[in-house]
Image (cartoon, rainbow, N blue to C red):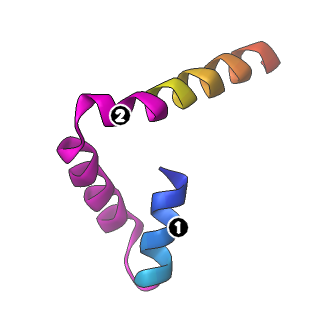
Amino acid sequence: SQIERRKIMEQSPDMHNAEISKRLGKRWKLLRDSDKIPFIREAERLRLKHMAAG
């Protein structure tokens, strides 16, 4: 998500964060479940890392 957010910001530097979030949300909804798996796994890895550090 951060990579995609950076891409949008580079293409449209004046776009507000709320609009970027809306676009990312639309892209997420269009992804097939199988395409979401790497992102879900990474989110879980980061969540566990954060919990261990806390």
* 24 to the left or right of 44: left
* 6 to the left or right of 53: left
Q: Earlier in the sequence, mark 2 or mark 1?
A: 1
Magenta highlight: main SS: helix
Say the numbered circle drawn on residue 36.
2
**Residue underneath mark 1:** 6
* 2 to the left or right of 37: right
- Quadrant of residue 51 in the image? top right
54 lies above or below 30: above
Report if residue 21 lies within the magenta region.
Answer: yes
Helix, strand or loop at mark 2: helix
User: How many numbered marks, from 0 up?
Assistant: 2
Q: Residue furthest right?
A: 53
Helix, strand or loop at mark 1: helix
28 lies above or below 21: above
Residue 8 x/y as whole percent: 42, 72
Crowd band around label 1 with a 10 angstrom C-alpha radius: few (<14), some (14–19), many (20+): few
53 lies above or below 8: above
* 7 to the left or right of 20: right
Residue 17 x/y as whole percent: 41, 66
Residues drawn in magenta: 13-39
- The one nearer the camera, 29 or 47, is 29
Give the amino acid type for the residue marked by disc 1 in the picture. Arg
Residue 39 x/y as whole percent: 46, 35
